[in-house]
Amino acid sequence: MSKPTGKLMQLADAIALIPDGASIMVGGFGSPGTPFSLLAELGRQGRRNLTIIKNDANQDGYGVSRLIESGAVSRLLTTHLGLSGPARRAHLAGTLEVEFFSQGLFAEQIRSAGVGLPGVVNDIELPEELGASRETISVGGRTLYFEPALHADFALLCAERADQYGNLSYRGAARNFSPLMAMAARRVLVETRTVCDAPLAPDCVHTPGIHVHGLIQIDGELDEYRPILR
């Protein structure tokens, strides 16, 4: 068996790779699976003009919501603004550009990027004020809509467990978007509390290590940015 490839990184060093203006996919379904430590360090290092691609904007004071409140995010691609008051206020004030997606298409457009497709074709109609700019094609006399693949410069993910080869296992709802984002981003950084010495069993691997560029092991104490989950 080959030796581990040295994917373990320090938190600050991992986030230092991300420049101002980067596009960043963020895993998580609400709080579960959100990489709160990576997002907190992103805010601490003062990045600006970020594009965030995440299912939701987290809740007030945490994760993506905290980044928006600090003015770090200029554009948000999401399925809903959820419990984030700062996101709603910034959007209404015109300081945050928000692009909304249906949740299924959001996942499929990310998956398309990961498998090398230009996008996905569907027959879902939208009100004119929401879908005026959509590209259409005609197939067998039917008008269909083309939704482009979603790519990103970086993906920030949170895994339940990892091994030193970068193989990842997620817990519950944390798995929803993270495996897709790991394929769709150019560079993938993952926080986890547990890095196993032995390789994960194949049936437990949800994201193969070939997609992962950096592993950050987080200490056991909950930090100030992380909501307590029951």
Image (cartoon, grey):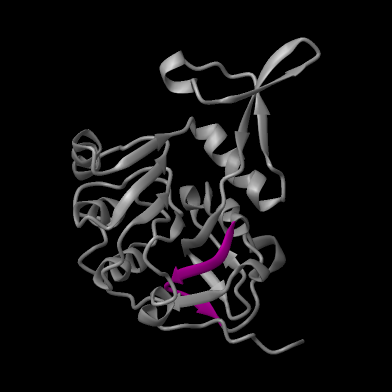
Where in the figure is residue 115, as x and y percent of width and height?
A: 71, 50
Q: Is residue 223 left or right of residue 110?
A: left
Question: Does residue 123 appear anywhere in the picture?
Answer: yes
Q: Is residue 130 above or below residue 195?
A: above
- What span is in magenta? 185-196
Instruction: Look at 46% across and 83% down and name the residue there.
Output: 9
- Is 135 placed left or right of 171 in the picture? right
Outermost right residue: 140
Q: Main secondary structure of the magenta part?
A: strand
- Whether residue 37 appears in magenta in the rendering, the answer is no
Position in image of residue 195 (x %, y %): 51, 78
Q: Is residue 16 left or right of residue 225?
A: right
Residue at 55% from the left image edge and 72% from the top image edge: 162
The N terminus sits in image quarter: bottom right
State which quadrant residue 213 falls in: bottom right
**Image quadrant where residue 142 sits:** top right
Query: What residue lies at 77% left-to-right and 10% top-to-bottom?
Result: 141
Pinpoint residue 126: horizontal percent, then vertical percent. Answer: 50, 17
Above or below, comparing residue 207 to residue 69 in the picture? below
Please provide percent x and percent y for residue 11: 38, 78
Residue at the location (33% across, 75% down)?
220
Q: Residue furthest bottom?
A: 3
Q: Nearer the viewer, residue 98 or 114?
A: 98
> Is residue 230 at all visible to an observer of this figure?
no
In this orientation, which residue lies closer to the viewer: 125 or 74?
A: 74
